[in-house]
Image (spheres, rainbow, N blue to C red):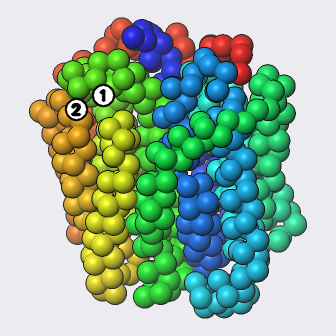
Amino acid sequence: MISKEKQIRNASIYILPVIISNLLPFLTLPIFTRILTTEDYGVLGLAYVYAIFVNGVANFGLTVGYERNYFEHKGTKNAAGLLYSTLLFVIIAVIICGFFTYLFKNQLSLWIIGSLDHANIFFWSYCATAVVGLKTYYLTYFKNSENAKSFVWFMIGESLLSVIFSLFLVAYLHVGVIGLVWGQLLASCIIFSILSFKFVRSFPISFNLEALKHSLKLSLPLTPRVFFGVIDTQFDKYMIGLLNTVGGVGIYSIGQKAAYIVFSYMTAIQNVFSPQVYRRMFEMGEDGGESIGRYLTPFLYISIAIGLMVALFSEEIICILTPKSYHGAIEIVTILSMLYGMSFFGKQPQLIYAKKTHITSMLTLVSIGLNILINIPFIMKWGAIGAAWGSLLAGFLSHMVKFIVSQHYYEIKWEYGKIVSIFLIFFGSAVAMILMRHFSIAYEFRLIFKCAAVFSYVYLGIKLKVITMENYTLIRNMIPLRRVVTSDHI
């Protein structure tokens, strides 16, 4: 098993690009929100709903299939064939979907936004999302091979380029909200090109039809999950635009952007624990459940830590970074932070390991049904805030169902007492902050409560032995960026 020192090193390394990729957009948010309106962000949000949806279908769930099958072909001559065959298949699918997107962009703009003025943003949003998706296969290789150096630098490079291009296009050339899309597209194309050149030099191009078929056999049942999963996670924006206003979508998008730090941070942590969870599953079989449960508790604690901070300080984040017209996003940030915090359990690969990927599609259908049934009345009654509460309630119910089903096929013996303590502080503090703002409690008292909640969570970490002098020393010794170097190969 991987050493504790290396686990902490990997965690600190994988978190680095998440910090930078989320920090840079927030540093530029005061600029963009004073140039772009809430309606601009609403249009952008709806365009990306479509882009994420179609690209998710075009990938046929192969991101999951490739990640799993990497371990079966690792160290064999089929490894390169699996990667290039997967990429070629997805590129062809993406081009076909892109052609139809360009062909029907006017109809899409009219149908989703109610105007023909934003047709181009649908096509370019699709292109930007497509290139980001293609790059994921290279990054998955880095993650699974535990080559954190390359993973980190390419992620950081893309974030920096995206911000630079976007600032130039929006703030200097004044091209409007589409400049954010073009900035992302240019950055992703550059990074994807460099990655392709780097891989081709080290791994001569080869194709393996059998390896691709094996991945498709696993991934195709996931396509409905992707198809419906995007509806599940993005349909709230469409419903706000349909039942409320495009400006309401913009407010919700800003709140979601801030809260999404929690999900991004958790995904970075997943990059550390996921390979180890797979290893325990494959090496120990059903007997690995107890080992995995103990192994994941510290990762849950540090994952929820960022959720707690975002939920508590959402008011400061939004008020400092945006003008008053965006301040309606404060409660949305807090509510969605709780939603994303629950997603830790959904990131466990129990059903994928058990080759029950078709069940994930069925669970996604259940989630969609709950999301639509709950969100429609909530949005009609309370607008964007209602969408956040509706998503939280629907997410809680759907996560519970998925948790029960996943445990049935592969039981992880979770440390339930510790988990309850973690979520009690997290949810209790977040709900208390919402109530204190609702009843106009003085900010000084709210700030004292926030500090008390943070100290309580730190104390819990000490009791759970996640915060220890040993871990502190290991992390302190890994802070210099030069220690990111973990390997010299691709």
Q: Quadrant of the C terminus?
A: top right
Amino acid type, residue under disc 1 in the picture: Leu
Q: Residues within 10 Å of mark 1 (few under 14, many from 20)?
A: many
Q: Which mark is residue 412?
A: 2
Is 48 positioned to the left or the right of 68 in the image?
Answer: right
- Other residues around mark 2 within 10 Å, as few (<14) / some (14–19) / many (≥20): many
Q: Position of residue 177 (x, y in %)?
A: 72, 71
* Residue 394 horizontal/vertical position (percent): 27, 66
Rounded to the nearest angstrom, the CA distance separating label 2 from label 1 is 10 Å
The residue positioned 45% from the left and 54% from the top of the image is 222
- Residue drawn at x 56%, y 25% is 73
- Note whether residue 388 is visible: yes
Tag 2, which secondary structure? loop
- Closer to us: mark 2 or mark 1? 2
Name the one closer to the observer, 365 or 458: 365
Q: Nearer the viewer, residue 198 or 212?
A: 212
Residue 182 pos. (x, y %): 78, 61
Pick the residue in front: 7 or 346: 346
Q: Which mark is residue 296?
A: 1
Question: What residue is at 84 percent from the left and 57 percent from the top?
Answer: 168
Q: x and y percent of residue 485 in the render?
A: 66, 15
